[in-house]
Image (cartoon, coloured by chain):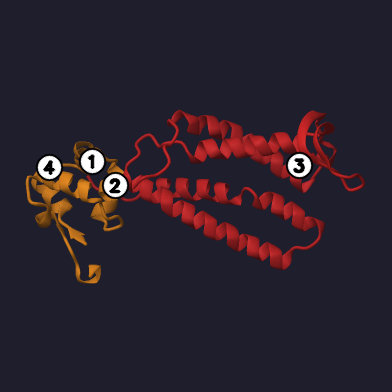
Amino acid sequence: MKTIRLLPHRYKTIGWIILIPSVIIGAIALTGVAASSNMSINGHTFAFISGGILEDNAYFSVIRTDLLATILGVLVTTGSLLVAFSREKQEDEYIASLRLSSFQWAVLVSYTILLLCFLTIFGLPFLTAMAFNMFTVILLFIIRFNYLLYKSKHSDYEK
Amino acid sequence: MKNNIRVERAILEMTQEQLAEKAGVSRQTIHAIEKGKYVPSAILALKIARIFKKPVEQIFSLEEHDS
């Protein structure tokens, strides 16, 4: 079965180190609990497209904006990709089949959640839900795949 | 599909771990095959049969519902 080549196993650990703190901070920042609505990292960056509620869109210009979402988004995405696309210590055909079924499961569950969001969340909170939903496919895959691996490693085994 | 891997292992007093190592796969794979949770590829089936020095049909056989 031809699939994408995976990164060496050590990238999985690097991925976890990036992913776990970023996901926690990201979830806190997104839901705005505690004082996190005051968290912001202002700076200049080059934007292909930018704009605001009261201003027209600007194209291909340097702007000054809150980069917290940008940084967290990049970290969570990179971390999850590293975790999801790194080899296990021993990759074989069975583990490859677990990977494939985990991806199918994650896509299905993620879009089911999306459907529920459309039917039950409205207005500005819907945008927050969509921000979470951007990551549910890859995060669900990571959870499902590692769960299946854990289950198969620790199932009753015979000598 | 059913298989006699566990029987053949017992005859040679081989553990799942040892068989896995000889076949170049993880122990989980052998365990999953024995439990009927995973159908091995043709290559892996042939490797396992070769380890047991038996023809592949003596280790693996089709069942009714495999149609």
Q: Which residue is mark 4?
A: B51
* Position of residue A1 measured from the top left corner of the image (x, y, whole percent): 33, 47
Which chain did the image draw in red?
Answer: A
Residue for point 31% across, 51% down: A156
Q: For the residues tagged 3 and 2, is the chain the same?
A: no
Secondary structure found at label 3:
helix
**Residue B37 versus residue B11 in the image, above or below:** below
Screen quadrant of the C terminus of chain A: top left
Q: Which residue is mark 2?
A: B29
In-image side of B28 versus A150 (left or right): left
Q: How far apart in space, not on screen, are marks 1 and 3 (Cα)?
A: 47 Å
Say few, some or many: other residues with alpha carbon within 10 Å of mark 3 (under 14 / 14 to 19 / 20 or more). many
Chain that bears disc 3: A
Task: Return the disc, 1 or 2, that comes first in the chain's sequence.
Answer: 1
Q: CA distance from mark 4 to mark 1?
A: 11 Å
Chain letter of mark 2 equals B
Q: Colour of chain B?
A: orange
Give x and y (percent) for residue B26: 29, 41
Query: Which amino acid type is shown beneath numbered disc 2?
Result: Thr
Residues tagged 1 and 2 counted as in contact (Cβ below 8 A)? yes
Would residue A151 be visible to someone looking at this image?
Answer: no
Name the residue tied to disc 1: B20
- Quick check: do tags 1 and 3 share a chain? no
Residue depicted at 53% across the width and 60% down the height: A108
Above or below — where is B18 with respect to B57?
A: above
Residue at the far front in the pictured view: A59
Q: Are marks 4 and 3 on the same chain?
A: no
Q: Is residue A58 left or right of residue B10?
A: right
Residue denoted by label 3: A29
Residue A111 visible in image: yes
- For the residue marked with disc 3, what is the amino acid? Ala
